[in-house]
Amino acid sequence: MTSESTDPSHAGTAPDIAALAKVVARQRAEMDRLRDQVATSAVLERTKGALMALTGCTPDAAGEELFQRAKAGNRTLLAECWITLGALVPPLPGAAQEAHPGHGFTGIPLAAVPGQAGPRAARPGAAVPTARDTCDLDDGFSALGRLGKALVHVATPQDLAGCLLEELAADVDADALLLFRALPAGGLEMIGHAGVEATLATQWAQVPPLSGIPALDALRAREPRWLEDFARDQEQHLLIGDPPERWLSRAWLPVPTGDGAEVCIGILRARSGPFSPQARQLLRAVARLCAGWLRSFGPRSEHSAAASAAAAQPVFDSLPGSAMLLTPLRGPSGEVEDYRIDAATAEAVDVAGRTGRQLLGRRILECFPSMAEEAVWHGCLRTLTTGEPFEGEPFAYQEVVDGAAALSTYSVHSARLGGALVVTWVRHDSSDRQEQRLADVQRLGNLGWANWNLVTDEGSWSSQAFLVLNRDPALGPVRLTDLPELALPEDAPVLARAVRDLVRTGRQFDVPFRVRTGDEVRHLRMVAEVVADTDNKPAEVHGFVQDLTAQRSAELALVVSEQAIVTQHGVLRAERTLAARLQHALLPLPTRPVRLAGLRVEVAYLPAQSGIHVGGDWFSAIELPGGDALFVVGDVAGHGIDAVATMAQLRFTAKGMVITGSSLTGALARLNTLLLHSRDSHGTATMILARYDPAEHCLVWAQAGHPPPLLVRDGEVRYLQRPPGILLGACSDPNFEEARCVLEPGDRVLLYTDGLVERPSEGIDRGLDRLAAAVAAHHADEPGSLAPLLTSVLEGERRDDVCVVDIRVPSGTE
């Protein structure tokens, strides 16, 4: 051991500093002790005062009551004070039943305590805690004691969250802690957090009233929610976290802070697995401790919309214009159904004439039904959700000014203020309205105004004029004399001459011209006039330019369309003339009745009156070499030259087949094959082939999809039963059969095409009935009676050709 010499001049310096440091440390410790004592005393005195108010006991008796409760619950006096303060409200349902008998952390409601309370007795039959349980409970008691002492230094909910996480991190493995408070209109707001980053806290600062939020479920049920199976919890709940796997187990405990649970504590743990019974008991006790702090020192639930409105109304009284403070009213689903007016300016007036404070407490849709308009409603909702201000489109509103109705223009603005909206109605003055109307006229008319000062040679254009002339506004207006340079070269001389005459003689001009914009050519119209000064000299030029491209394009398209229609009409007329001549050449009509095989035959052909095409209706009535008579009526689908050509092909082929000995059904089968395999065929056709044997007075007939013949006998009219047969050209293997009808003297048979019985607005059955009724009414037997019959059947304009073959069997007197 060595010794060192000391300078006498510095003797005592180091010991003095050390002594001074010890004094300062003792004073700081004493100050901390006194501060803790004062804070603890404040909590104790507040609790004693609450107990005295409820029981009417003395201060000493209240102090003794608290001491006995702390002793019975194996708690510190400070922790008992916090629990007692929280017990000023009814306990949560089921909390007392879940507490461990004899060692429950749940406080006793003061309203149920008439006086002093002695130590609690264990319930009969209660399980005796094991040594490990006792150790765990003792740890819980110590944690509550530490937390109770720490709470006296907590000043804000954010401090409370940090304090809780610090005290609970070791006892329940808590990694993060959140504090949520229920909002009056539904939903939650975060009032404190610890263990989470600021970004995540900002994202969850406001929680709408959605289903699947565990904190909301815990507050509504007033029971804790233990989320201990992450896979199942992720399917059933909306979990906090980015990603949610960051915390595999969670607990949400409601805290009673008033008449019900308004604050919820969230414990987030990184590890999975259930919370132990001791951890659950400890967390319930922590909720009770926090209830006392929140009730006595925390933010008051009385900070409600009503209080905010009361504070805001004096401010709104001094504001000009029409403005209101709107609190959202949410339905069971959490969606905003209406707004309550909580503050209004003196100039705010509703549709019923109520103003200012008369509007307070009323619903916005009651006072202003126009707010339900979709754009305004969704704009306000967007502001309420995102915080971005909303400015609606101007709208017209009729109001009463000095007893007279006046139409004014307003626009709605909204901005968020906390959880409410400040909505203002901005009235536009006359100049704003005129400017808006001018802008609307220019936009709707696709025109823009342009002015030039002839003295300064400067111009001014509206924004729409730059758009119409396809000029960059940054380049500014062109000089009046340079205006023709914007036109196409072939139009520039006309525009230049008009501008020159305008400046020299003051002659107004209205000139069309074209400009090129990229690959497009625009058709424009320029109208301008001169304004003279006091000396009657040209001073300014006022005008407008209008884009007529759409109108001009429509006019050109109309001209082209009209030319095409005229051309097509001429082609169709020429085709009709040719087809009509061909038809008349192929299908000559007899001018009077003819005699065939002892029968009197009369034929009528009436072309369609609508359209310009010739149809494919045709007939044949000839006497065969053996003395029999052949009658054919057919109808080719379509119109025009193709239909006439197909008609001629079928007509001559059918006659040739029957003349050469083919049966009626055989002829129809071959004609069907002809239509199917002929490239020039028109497609399909209907037909009736009938052969009359004068020796047996028998009419044998077959049909291919054609209306049945009509038989008149002894004044009775009926249609012959059609044998099987489908229209020609429909299939490759049709089935045709013949039918026989023995004719008697005086019988009449009508063969006809469908144009006689078909009308667009009715079924063919009705047309057949109409024909039968007309034939029964016109029973004349003299020649030429077919024309009056057709006149009575055919009413109005004919859309199709009509062909009729009228066959009469002479009576015995002829």
Image: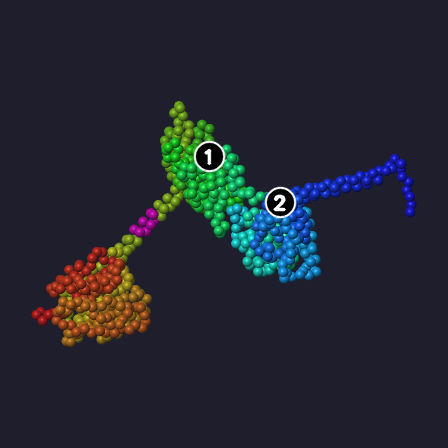
The answer to whether residue 631 is above or below residue 217 is below
Q: Residue at x 63, y 62 (%)?
A: 125
Nearest to the eye among marks 1 and 2: give it: 2
Q: Residue at x 37, y 32 (%)?
A: 403
What is the spatial separation of the Cα atoms under label 1 and label 2, in whole angstroms?
53 Å
Q: Residue at x 50, y 42 (%)?
A: 421
Q: Is residue 559 magenta?
A: yes
Q: Secondary structure at mark 2?
A: loop
Q: Residue at x 32, y 51 (%)?
A: 564
Q: What secondary structure predominates along the stretch shown in magenta?
A: helix
181 or 596, which is in the foreground? 181
Point out residue 475 in the picture as x, y percentages from the top left corner: 49, 37
Q: How is the image coloured?
A: rainbow
Q: What residue range appears in magenta? A: 558-566
Q: Earlier in the sequence, mark 1 or mark 2?
A: 2
Q: Secondary structure at mark 1?
A: loop
Left or right, 12 with reference to 644: right
63 or 77, which is in the foreground? 63
The 10 Å Cα crowd at callout 2, few under 14, some 14 to 19, many 20 or more, is some
The answer to whether residue 705 is above or below residue 443 is below
The answer to whether residue 266 is above or below residue 488 is below
Q: Residue beneath label 1, please?
A: 346
Q: Which amino acid type is marked by label 2?
A: Cys
Point out residue 101 in the picture as x, y percentages from the top left corner: 63, 57
Point out residue 407 in the picture as x, y percentages from the top left corner: 39, 36
Q: Residue beneath label 2, please?
A: 57
Q: Is residue 82 magenta?
A: no
133 or 654, which is in the foreground? 133
